[in-house]
Amino acid sequence: MLFDIKFDRVCTDKDRGKKSHFEFINNSALPEYCKIRSLLNMCFNEFDEKSQNDIRSRIIKNKSEEKFYSTCFELLVAHIFRRLGCQLEEHPNISDTNKRPDFLVTLSDGEYFYLENMMIGA
């Protein structure tokens, strides 16, 4: 799990203050953040253990807003493609380059493409 489901949450603050995004969402007792935790946990559990460790590191240890949002977006995009019946390879090596896009997406008909999520703007 990304967010502990047995954690007793009592915080009802609507403002995050100086907490990281993860800390705020993890500690909030508000119903909307319970839904966010549930969705992100579901998406997170679709990844293998190695990827989960990387995701934890990017979301929990990194206090960057951009890293938090981009990692959560990766989780959601991967979940959508999996729901559509696609196979995903996470951070595949592209031959003869040092590039590692977010996913190699293989469609049910065997067609495939590389997918790199990008955040534009702030």
Image (cartoon, rainbow, N blue to C red):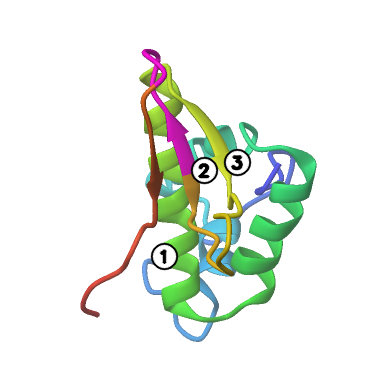
Of pointers 1 and 3, the one earlier in the residue sequence: 3
Position in image of residue 50 (x %, y %): 78, 48
Of pointers 1 and 2, the one earlier in the residue sequence: 2
Q: Secondary structure at mark 2?
A: helix
Amino acid under label 2?
A: Leu
Q: Of discs 2 and 3, which sits in the foreground?
A: 3
- Examine the rendering and report whether any part of residue 100 can be seen: yes
Is label 2 in contact with label 3 (beta carbons under 8 Å)? yes
Q: For this view, does 81 lie left or right of residue 56?
A: left
The quarter of the image holding the N terminus is top right
Q: Secondary structure at mark 3?
A: helix
- Camera-nearest residue between 85 and 28: 85
Q: Which residue is rendered at x = 51% and y = 81% of the image? A: 64
Q: Residue furthest left?
A: 121
Toward which corner of the image does residue 61 lie, by quadrant? bottom right
The Cα atoms of the two marked residues, 1 and 3, are separated by: 14 Å
Q: Residue furthest front?
A: 96
Q: Which residue is mark 2?
A: 40
Q: For this view, does 35 lie left or right of residue 91?
A: left
- Examine the rendering and report whether any part of residue 35 can be seen: no
Mark 3, residues whose alpha carbon is within 10 Å: few (<14), some, or many (≥20)? many
Amino acid under label 1?
A: Tyr
Q: Which residue is mark 3?
A: 44
Q: Which residue is rendered at x = 65% and y = 37% of the image? A: 47
| Chain part drawn in magenta | 104-110
Is label 1 in contact with label 2 (beta carbons under 8 Å)? no
The Cα atoms of the two marked residues, 1 and 2, are separated by: 12 Å
Q: Which residue is mark 1?
A: 69
Give the answer, above or below, for where 95 lies relative to 48. Answer: below
